[in-house]
Image (cartoon, rainbow, N blue to C red):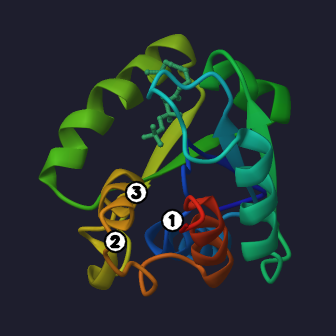
Amino acid sequence: MKNVKAIYPGTFDPLTNGHLDLIERGSKIVDELVVAILRNSDKGAPLFSVAERQEMISQSVKRFENVSVMTFDGLLVDFARSQGAKAVLRGIRAITDYEYEFPMAMMNRKLDPNLETLFMMPTEQYTYVSSRLIKGVFKLGGDVSELVPPLVMQQMKAKLPAKS
Ligand code: PNS
């Protein structure tokens, strides 16, 4: 691929090791990768603010020279165009992801036929990991420390109400 800038969009509430694995894989095949956090997500009350997520992701991707972290609002195709990106990177873990991703990819193609969606699979180790599951298990006292970056784990613990 020649001089390709790609956007890796998502909610990232929080960043998981699955996301990080995909960022690493993506950074090896494109020239520039922008991790883009959606600001106006309709997923309900987030665990982390967008600023907190941006900071945690920035710290976690420091070692990848061609990866940056931004936030966006509105249509992904508009953001991609404003960044001069030719591709969108998304992860596919299981067939259920395909059902969620396919209409989004087709809609994005309808809105901008020049923007390609690239799908990559994270390592098998993380195929069941999602931000939603991480939050749910953590809130119930489960150990998710092997599934998120250390900084994210630390910040999640800091969100727990102080024990009296
Ligand atoms: O982490 P997520 O929730 O799976 O990411 C979803 C995301 C951010 C990729 C998607 O909701 C998105 O692109 N939203 C921006 C609005 C948009 O462009 N919608 C039309 C594409 S279907």
Residue type, mark 1 in image: His
Residue 108 lies, in percent from the top left, at 48, 22
Q: Earlier in the sequence, mark 3 or mark 2?
A: 3
Residue beneath the point at 18% across and 36% down: 99
Identify the image quadrant of the N terminus. Answer: bottom right
Q: Is residue 5 visible?
A: no
Q: Farthest left residue?
A: 95
The answer to whether mark 3 and mark 2 are in CB contact below 8 A is no
Residue type, mark 2 in image: Gly
In front: mark 3 or mark 2? Answer: 2
Query: Left or right: where does residue 15 sit relative to residue 65?
Result: left
Identify the image quadrant of the C terminus. Answer: bottom right
Q: Is residue 11 visible?
A: yes
Who is closer to the viewer here, 102 or 130? 130
Residue named by callout 1: 19
In front: mark 2 or mark 1? Answer: 2
Who is closer to the viewer here, 139 or 78? 139
Residue 76 lies, in percent from the top left, at 62, 25
Please tell me in which quadrant of the rendered image residue 72 appears. top right
Seen in the picture, residue 26 relative to 7 is either above or below; the reply is below
The label shown at residue 135 is: 3
What SS does tag 1 mark? helix
Q: Farthest front residue?
A: 164
What SS does tag 2 mark? loop
Residue named by callout 2: 141
User: Quick one: label 2, few (<14), some, or many (20+) residues within 10 Å?
Assistant: few
What is the C-alpha distance between the residues marked 2 and 1?
22 Å
